[in-house]
Image: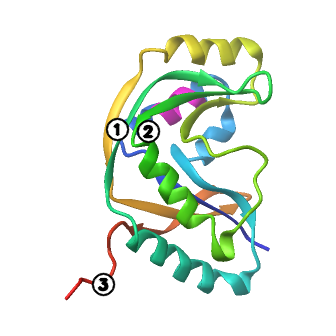
């Protein structure tokens, strides 16, 4: 059964810089995880469900308009989860609407925590590395336009690979 995820990619140069930062912290798995804002967390699906999921994601994208995201400063989910992240401070509503639209139908998944849009920059590392990420990225800021999101498929050897993009607002034109 394939494992998929749906995310907003953080474009380069910010995406690449943040990914390199994660690797520099000692997170070798970061090389296999493109920098992103999660919409649908890792989910196992049947191979026969991929067509329905693709159709669902296309409809979800068509129903949403492009928006701007601004990332700024750090936050953490500690002590509940050993994660440090960059906060989404503009575009929260757009992320939440996309997450709701994508997490329905064939991707109506149960999640452990309420949706909180963010960009993970340190995960399951030593406390010192988590503290370093929290401190060094406290003033980090970037802005980008969200015009699409991606379906990712996990591969044990190559990590998370974007397999298809879905353009926002690409629905049929009104007549």
Q: Residue at x 53, y 55 (%)?
A: 7
- Tell me the SS state at disc 3: loop
Q: Which mark is residue 16?
A: 2
Q: Which mark is residue 13?
A: 1
Say how the picture is coloured: rainbow
User: Which one is in front in this view, the residue at disc 3 or the one at disc 2?
Assistant: 3
- Determine whether 1 is above or below 101 in the image: below
Q: Is residue 128 magenta?
A: no
Determine which quarter of the picture holds residue 172: bottom left
Q: Which residue is mark 3?
A: 172
- Tell me the SS state at disc 1: loop
Q: Residue at x 47, y 50 (%)?
A: 95
x%, y% of residue 113? 74, 43
x%, y% of residue 54? 55, 79
The 10 Å Cα crowd at callout 2, few under 14, some 14 to 19, many 20 or more, is: some
The stretch of residues the image draws in magenta is: 18-22
- Determine whether 152 is above or below 106 in the image: above
Q: CA distance from mark 2 to mark 1?
A: 5 Å
């Amino acid at each position: 059964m394939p494992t998929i995820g749906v995310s907003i990619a953080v474009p380069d140069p910010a995406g690449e810089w943040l990914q390199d930062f994660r690797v520099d912290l000692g997170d070798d798995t970061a090389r296999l995880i493109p920098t992103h804002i999660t919409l649908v967390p890792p989910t196992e699906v049947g191979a026969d469900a991929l067509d329905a999921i693709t159709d669902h994601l296309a409809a979800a994208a068509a129903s949403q308009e492009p928006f701007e995201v601004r990332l700024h400063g750090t936050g953490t989910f500690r002590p509940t989860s050993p994660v440090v992240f960059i906060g989404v401070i503009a575009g929260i509503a757009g992320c939440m609407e996309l997450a709701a639209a994508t997490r329905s139908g064939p991707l109506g998944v149960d999640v452990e925590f309420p949706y909180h849009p963010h960009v993970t920059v340190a995960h399951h590392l030593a406390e010192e590395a988590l503290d370093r990420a929290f401190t060094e990225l406290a003033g980090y800021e970037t802005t980008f336009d969200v015009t699409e999101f991606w379906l990712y498929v996990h591969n044990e050897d190559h990590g998370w690979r974007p397999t298809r993009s879905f353009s926002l607002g690409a629905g049929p034109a009104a007549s």
